Image (cartoon, grey):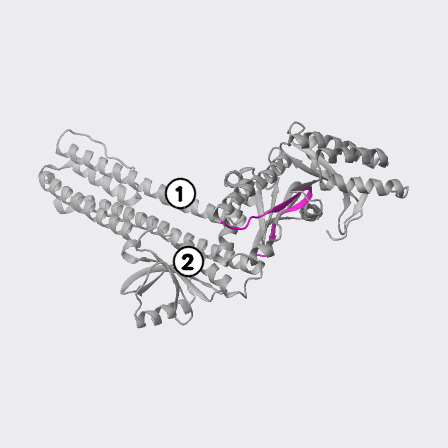
Amino acid sequence: MFLVVLPLVMVPLILAQTASYFNAVNGVTRLARQLLGFKLEEMEKFANLQWLILSENDFVERPVMVEAAKRSVEQYARSILLSDSEIIFAIDSFGSLEMSTSDPLFYPDEIEALLEILAGEIQGLQTAVIGGESRIFQSFYFEPFGWHILITEKEQVFYIDANIIRTQTFITLGISSIAAILLLILITSGLTKPLGRIVQAMNGVIETADLSSRVDVEYRDETGVVAQTFNKMTEELDRAYGQIKRYAFDAVLAGKKEERIRHIFQKYVPNNVIEKFFASPEKMLVGDNRKLSILFSDIRSFTTISEGLAPDDLVHSLNRYFTGQVDVIYSRNGIVDKYIGDAIMAFWGAPEKQENDALQSVLSGLEMIESVKQFNENQRRLGKCEFQIGIGLNYGEVTVGNIGSERKMDYTVIGDAVNLASRMEGLTKTYQADILISESLFEELRKTSPNSGLRIRLLDTVAVKGKTKGVKIFTVKKTLSPAEEKAWPVHNQGMKLYYSRAFSEAAEKFKEALGFLPGDFNADNLYNRCLEYVSSPPPNDWNGVEVMKNK
């Protein structure tokens, strides 16, 4: 009887524990592998970003700048380490150590074996002996530096959670087995017909692999105790197995969703936008025509600045500058489209239209100017040169969507409205203004945000390069100085007289504005222009448009 009943108790227990063990180990190992792979992707993105900065600023042929970029890669590698035993290092094709977060000890035969593995270009987890220790690693080849970059962890540390689960499983299985054997020895002599029903129930569990099955407790004796023990055991195993399956499933699902979102948005998307499309990211793949607000910002005289800074100071200053600017854009629900050297392109209104996109874009531009002021205060404390920027904004219809090839796509916008936004940024130098907005953006603000409280000043009507139709351009501020409070309304009155060809009256208004703001470029420019038109009036078909030949 004992030999008959024992297998019926032990087989379901072993099967359940074994299944729990493999599911738990697979889940834990998968998470560890995904974490290692995630850090590898972040390393590759950071290295590519550093190379992009070098390329766009024509620093590729400058060894000092390249060396600074390499050191930035090394510093970033140190920042993503999670344990003392983890090492990130780079070697060239001859096995020379180029970069390392630690000092791994290589033996000659280890270098040769590692180079053979890297030459095979096998993706995923790989194992090699480094410094006399077996280590798990993933790698990628970064061609611009000629580096094989490896993220490694000791094998025993990498599989430590799996080993703990295995030990706990063996202990649990051993304890459960001993308890079951002792219990069977005590009660087999008294088991008869009720035991047969229990054996039948156990066979049912074995056949269906359904741990939710339970045995009816018919008697309050040894047979009833066995039935209760069996029910409790299968209940706990079923609960544990269900938790492991849910944990593993949630982890895999979350990893896949994150990977898809990162592929689509290249990590430059605000969290609130990602959350809205988390359940259906495929919606973001469809191109579409819509009206957006587009912003361009640029550092003035950047070439001169770069020549006056050491490479590492330049990289550090740029990183701090971009951090402040991008934080402002994200806080206003904007999307950073791309970095163009030292310039930033951003837009509002896609992938999902937000409330008051036009107002949010203008407020973002004004706050970016304030952010630069704070940045310059820190620069002065450090004894470094200050940055001056110009910002141009436009509102209009563009094509927005994923554009590129199957191997590399960007979520971006294209169209004439984008080009005009870029031209607006260029005009900030001509009109000596920190920020300029287009006529279409001004009209959108009047329509959607009439109570924004923004103070706006009309500067001119221009036809930018490649266009014949004139566009009114405005500068904007949140608040005005006492002198500006007096000058700006008078200036705007002068613009109305100017466009109605009342040049003498307009000149008086601009002169009055100059009385409040001595040396103001735009008031002085329009005052002189009006004086010229008084003595030499423009043709009858004149519409106030100034043709910009260089912008």
Within 10 Å of the Cα at label 2, are there few (<14), some (14-19), or many (20+) other Cα atoms? many
Residue nearest the observer in this picture, 79 or 125: 79
- Left of 159 or right of it: where is 440? right
Q: Secondary structure at mark 1?
A: helix
- The amino acid on which the numbered mark 1 sits, given as a three-letter code, is Asp
Q: Measuring 25% from the left and 46% from the top, which residue is drawn there?
A: 17
- Left of 443 or right of it: where is 403? left
Location of the N terminus (image quadrant): top left
Q: Position of residue 363 (x, y in %)?
A: 60, 36
Q: Is residue 471 visible?
A: no
- The amino acid on which the numbered mark 2 sits, given as a three-letter code, is Glu
Q: Position of residue 486 (x, y in %)?
A: 70, 29
Which mark lies nearer to you, 1 or 2? 2
Q: Measuring 65% from the left and 41% from the top, which residue is drawn there?
A: 292
State how far apart marks 1 and 2 are (Cα). 33 Å
Q: Position of residue 523 (x, y in %)?
A: 75, 38
Q: Residue under circle 1?
A: 250
To which quarter of the image does residue 476 belong? Answer: top right
Q: Is residue 397 magenta?
A: yes
Q: Position of residue 173 (x, y in %)?
A: 20, 46
- Left of 176 or right of it: where is 518? right
Q: Earlier in the sequence, mark 1 or mark 2?
A: 2
To which quarter of the image does residue 123 belong? Answer: bottom left
Residue nearest the observer in this picture, 337 or 36: 337
Q: Please identify the dominant SS of the magenta region.
A: strand
The span shown in magenta is 383-407
Q: Residue under circle 2?
A: 74
- Left of 416 or right of it: where is 256? left
What residue occupies the far right of the structure in this picture? 540
To which quarter of the image does residue 95 belong? Answer: bottom left
Q: Is residue 51 visible?
A: yes
Q: Measuring 55% from the left and 45% from the top, which residue is drawn there?
A: 282
